[in-house]
Amino acid sequence: MKALLLSEYKHLALTDMPEPEIGPEEVLIRVKACGICGSDVHGYDGSTGRRIPPIVMGHEAAGTIAEVGRNVKDLVEGDRVTFDSTVFCGHCFFCRRGQANLCDHREVLGVSCDDYRRGGAFAEYVAVPRRICYRLPPELPFSHAAMIEAIGVAVHAVSLTPIQINDTAVVMGAGMIGLLTLQAAKLAGCGRVISVDVDDTRLEAARKLGATHTVNAKALDTPEHVKALTEGRGADVAIECVGATATIQNSIASVRKGGTVTLVGNITPNIELPLQSVVARQIRVQGSCASSGEYPACIDLLSRGAIRVEPMISATAPLDKGPEWFERLYRGEPNLMKVVLEP
Ligand SMILES: [Zn+2]
Ligand SMILES: [Zn+2]
């Protein structure tokens, strides 16, 4: 089969590789669409240590069943599916209490690090355990279905955030996860959703997708602006989708006393925390990792158009154009959001 192999850092090439073999509990998927994730772009040059070559990346995908393992009885060839990026074991302490995202033996498709190497979906075929697959409705395009993994991240973060009807939420960052999170926050009952970014094009997209207010953090003092919109109190919750000191500090300063800040962005290992502001104002700061059990809801939300992804898809391209698109994303070409490869 053809696969996009990262043979060394910053070098991707369409390569002939053996088709993956499947175990009794696994299925072979004919990949129809696979999104390029920010983490793939960051892994491409070795800076994250999570894409050690050689590796076929890709974990935001959808396709059809090509073959099923001996013990798989409820899927057949041709079924349209998507799958979680997290391969969980199903029997550790965390899996058994319904937190597959925290599995002790967690592996992520298309990742190779010091602990494991697992081939991903920038390929004609990928093998995955049956237990991470979900059936897709017939009318949902594969390129949209490839975004379900990211929708899961947003829906999980919002589910962890205590939101009451008509609350005000700040969503820090209007990249793909931020744009999905603001839609999920509205669905969860937020009356006002304030999207914050430094890029006006992204803020424009945020408004189109339902943000009631937008703040360009380069032009305005975010916490002051949020307070002005909330009778001087601050927002009830903030969901942080960037992961840097400045944006986390702004999130903390933008919530009211007793508010919650949910951290999703994860680009820096350490940040500087304004401890006294968190403690004295009794702020809850919590992390949110991947998703856990939200896939069926995400598939339904996307199929019904309650969550929209098409404004975020900048391009779809065949697999052999992958190296070019990786380069363009890596160079940080403006106005590029999600690029979906179609093997
Ligand atoms: Zn991803
Ligand atoms: Zn487990």
Image (cartoon, rainbow, N blue to C red):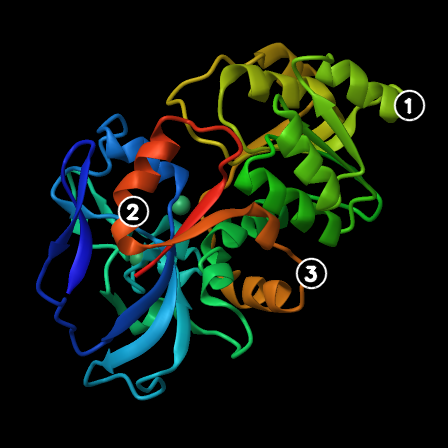
Q: Which residue is mark 3?
A: 306
Expressed as whole percent of the image width and height from the top left, the position of residue 251 reads: 64, 23
Q: Earlier in the sequence, mark 3 or mark 1?
A: 1
The quadrant of the image that shows the C terminus is: bottom left
Disc 3 to disc 1, C-alpha distance? 30 Å
Disc 2 to disc 1, C-alpha distance? 49 Å
Q: Secondary structure at mark 2?
A: helix
> What residue is drawn where x is 66% and y is 26%?
200
Mark 3 packing: few (<14 Cα in 10 Å), some, or many (20+)? some
Ligand 2's quadrant is bottom left
Ligand 1 within 8 Å, label 1 CB: no
Mark 2 packing: few (<14 Cα in 10 Å), some, or many (20+)? many
Q: Earlier in the sequence, mark 2 or mark 1?
A: 1
Q: Earlier in the sequence, mark 3 or mark 2?
A: 3
Report if residue 155 is visible in the image.
yes
Residue 322 is tagged as 2
The type of residue carrying mark 3 is Ala
Relative depth, front residue between 70 and 16: 16
Whether 259 is drawn above or below 211: the answer is above
Left or right for 16, reference 74: left
Q: How many callouts does the rendering have?
A: 3
Q: Secondary structure at mark 3?
A: loop
Q: Which residue is mark 1?
A: 231
